[in-house]
Structures are given as C-alpha cells and as structure tokens.
Image (spheres, rainbow, N blue to C red):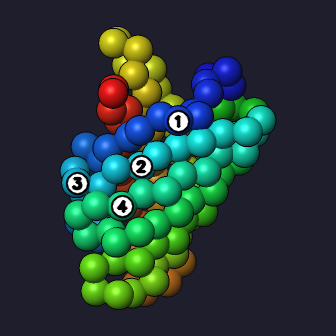
C-alpha cells in the first residue's frame, strides 16, 4: 500500500458516524508530493475544508483536518485512514477519526474514489 499515489484523485463519502459532518454530497480533491498528502473538500454540510496527512510506512494516512460547516463553525479533528484497493481499481479509505473541538466524539467513516 505504500505505492499509492493520491495526486488529483476525487473521493466521496459512502459511510459516516452520526456525529460526523461529511456526507455523500461532500467531495474531496486529494494531492500528493512524496509522503505528504493534502486535500480540499466541500459539499453538503461542509462549506469548505482542508486536510493534511503523512503517509505512514504501512501506507496508512495520519491526518489532521479542519473545515467550516454550514452553521459557520470552524471544526477540527484528526483521522487515521487505511487504504484499500477495490476490485475495479478505485481506492477506498476506511477512517477512524476524532473531533479535537466541540464534543470530542470519535467516529468511523468510509470514502471511495470517484472516477472522472
């Protein structure tokens, strides 16, 4: 999994915990340079967000994210994303996350690559 290149890939949420704000309308646009990954995301309850991650030796992403939701709140958190390659070659990220603001709840989400 270390050889995955996230550059210029689009992802969409397919599953999220109830305390999460990302939904199927949220689109993530990923970029990568060496072991640094970043993305912007928006849609649904997210007005605009960014994330930054470091690719770990096992291929997982150690990530920090922040966004402004439709209520005008700035929300922040951390996330551990484990990549999977689907049968059709698209990527899936299985994620465990926690808010670092608000109620500090933990959650689980899954995003999958959207082919153009």
Q: In which quarter of the view is residue 78 placed? A: bottom right
**Residue at position x 61%, y 25% from top?**
4
- As measured in the structure, the alpha-carbon distance from the residue carrying label 3 to the one carrying label 4 is 8 Å
Q: Is residue 67 visible?
A: yes
Q: Position of residue 27 (x, y in %)?
A: 34, 50
Q: Which residue is mark 4?
A: 42
Asked if the residues shown at circle 3 and circle 2 are in contact, with their CB atoms under 8 angstroms apart, the answer is: no
Horizontal arrangement in the rendering, residue 39 relative to residue 43 (left or right): right
Q: Is residue 17 visible?
A: no
- As measured in the structure, the alpha-carbon distance from the residue carrying label 3 to the one carrying label 1 is 19 Å
Query: Which disc is residue 28 wearing?
Result: 2
Above-or-below relation of 107 to 71: above
Q: Position of residue 42 (x, y in %)?
A: 36, 61
- Residue mark closest to the camera, 3 vs 1: 1
Q: Which residue is mark 1?
A: 8
**Residue at position x 45%, y 20% from top?**
85
- Crowd rating for badge 1 (residues with CA inside 10 Å; few <14, some 14–19, many 20+): few
Q: Which residue is mark 3?
A: 25
* For marks 1 and 4 on the same chain, the one whose residue lies earlier in the sequence: 1
- As measured in the structure, the alpha-carbon distance from the residue carrying label 1 to the one carrying label 4 is 15 Å
- Crowd rating for badge 2 (residues with CA inside 10 Å; few <14, some 14–19, many 20+): many
Asked if the residues shown at circle 3 and circle 1 are in contact, with their CB atoms under 8 angstroms apart, the answer is: no
- Look at the numbered disc 2 and give the secondary structure of its residue: strand
- Look at the numbered disc 3 and give the secondary structure of its residue: loop
* For marks 3 and 1 on the same chain, the one whose residue lies earlier in the sequence: 1
């Amino acid at each position: 999994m270390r050889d995955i290149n996230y550059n210029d890939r689009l992802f969409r949420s397919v599953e999220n915990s109830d305390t999460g704000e990302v939904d199927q309308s949220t689109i993530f646009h990923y970029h990568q340079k060496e072991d640094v990954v970043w993305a912007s995301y928006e849609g649904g309850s997210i007005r605009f967000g960014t994330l930054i991650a470091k690719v770990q030796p096992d291929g997982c992403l150690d990530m920090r994210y922040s966004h402004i939701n439709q209520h005008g709140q700035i929300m922040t958190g951390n996330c551990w994303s484990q990549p999977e390659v689907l049968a059709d070659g698209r990527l899936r990220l299985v994620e465990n996350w926690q808010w670092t603001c608000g109620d500090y709840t933990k959650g689980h989400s899954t995003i999958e690559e959207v082919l153009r």
